Image (cartoon, rainbow, N blue to C red):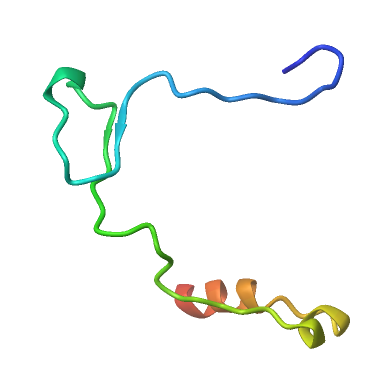
Amino acid sequence: MLPHSGLTLHYANAFHRYSGTDYPERRPYYFELSVASLAPDVVVEPTWDDYINGRDPVMNAVAARLR
């Protein structure tokens, strides 16, 4: 935590692998997180109407996936 602003910072303390490309010089990986894409599984487009009416379509989509 920064003393004057109170902001909390985080830095990577190890190499994380997100792509299928191998980096032998950086082994061992802290996390092996190879994924095909960083695109979301579900795309939710909030609307102005959602905002005005206090609805959260993103949270609704999360809740639906958890059920």
Residue 2 lies, with reference to residue 18, above or below; the image says above
Q: Is any part of residue 39 visible from this angle?
A: yes
Q: Is residue 11 left or right of residue 7?
A: left
Q: Is residue 60 left or right of residue 50?
A: left
Q: Is residue 58 left or right of residue 29?
A: right
* Residue 41: quadrant of the picture: bottom left
Q: How many marks?
A: 0
Residue 64 lies, with reference to residue 5, above or below; the image says below
Quarter of the rendering occupied by the N terminus: top right
Expressed as whole percent of the image width and height from the top left, the position of residue 63 reads: 56, 75
Tell which of 33 and 48 is nearer to you: 48
Residue 4 lies, with reference to residue 17, above or below; the image says above
Tell me what residue is drawn at x 21 percent, y 20 percent.
26
Expressed as whole percent of the image width and height from the top left, the position of residue 29 reads: 23, 27
Tell me what residue is drawn at x 87 percent, y 82 percent.
52
Residue 22 lies, with reference to residue 38, above or below; the image says above
* Residue 14: quadrant of the picture: top left
Expressed as whole percent of the image width and height from the top left, the position of residue 43 reads: 50, 76
Tell which of 32 and 18 is nearer to you: 18
* Residue 15: quadrant of the picture: top left
Tell me what residue is drawn at x 29 percent, y 26 percent.
30
- Residue lying furthest top in this view? 3
Q: Is any part of residue 67 visible from this angle?
A: no
Tell me what residue is drawn at x 70 percent, y 25 percent.
8
